[in-house]
Amino acid sequence: MNYPAVMGVVNVTPDSFYEASRGVTTDEAIARGRALFAAGADVVDVGGESTRPGATPVDVEEELARVIPVVTVLARDGVVSIDTQKEAVARAALEAGASILNDVSSTLYGVAAAYGARYVAMHRLENEQGMVLDPHYDDVVAEVSAFLEDVATRARAAGVQDLWLDYGLGFGKNAEHNQTLLAATGHFVDLARRFDARLLVGASRKRFLIGNFGQNLPAEERMEGTVAVHAWALEAGADVLRVHDVPVAVQLRELVRRPTSEVVLP
């Protein structure tokens, strides 16, 4: 895979926070995934359970019914990631053709190792039901770093060969925590390199991007903040952007990595 890489999001859910990313039916989700590949996505990340704060859990059978038909088809078109924290769903999706396991719980590294899959380990302070509470860190960079170092060590010991780390923007962090982590992106790139791993940044259209505007901008109006954060992350050395808006991210990626001498100004 070429880096920086763009991972496009397909949510086979009725309740993910950004409506345009949802494909409630199998056919809708497949169509969205194919459109993302056509727009230049290096990976399409398929999820059947929302991980937004306050989301209602989905049972295994329902999640399997949502994602496996979609993974099966899209895996014929390109690299597919399964976004799940359930072992049964992870195994079924990897058997159906997914080659990346994106795990917000950071507990399924043994499954990824068993299937020879790339593994994404993410930090979160609590589960979906707890993330709406007021999060606290004495030192958010140090604490997230310690967590990622620990899970990276365990993943490598379990046999994971291709490891991606994600500092979990928006997952059990307030706006100040997220901004602090973003400012330390270069540090997290260095941390990932110590484990011969890649850094994934997932900031797309998240609530903290409204900044200090004093208004609750809906997800549909957070494009500008998303682009700004992605540009910062790429300049700091991030390897993967997980995004809802693939065409914009692909254009940004090409601009950021192009030598200045090749940029033609109007």
Image (cartoon, rainbow, N blue to C red):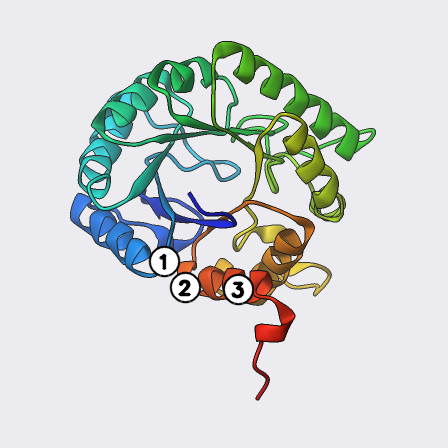
Please provide percent x and percent y for residue 102. Answer: 44, 31
Left or right side of 194 for 87: left
Left or right side of 183 for 101: left
Residue wearing tag 3: 252
Q: Answer with mark 3 or mark 2, whichever residue precedes in sequence.
A: 2
Q: Pick the residue in front: 184 or 64.
A: 184
Are the residues at dot 3 and dot 1 in contact (C-beta closer than 8 Å)? no
Left or right side of 206 for 113: left
Mark 3 and mark 1: span between their CA atoms?
Answer: 12 Å
**Amino acid type, label 2:** Pro
Quarter of the figure with the C terminus:
bottom right
**Amino acid type, label 1:** Gly
Q: Residue at x 55, y 10 (%)?
A: 157
SS state under label 2 = helix
Please provide percent x and percent y for residue 70. Answer: 22, 39
Are the residues at dot 1 and dot 2 in contact (C-beta closer than 8 Å)? yes
Quadrant in which residue 132 is drawn? top right
Residue wearing tag 2: 247
Q: Residue at x 64, y 52 (%)?
A: 233
Mark 3 and mark 2: span between their CA atoms?
Answer: 9 Å
Quadrant in which residue 189 is drawn? top right
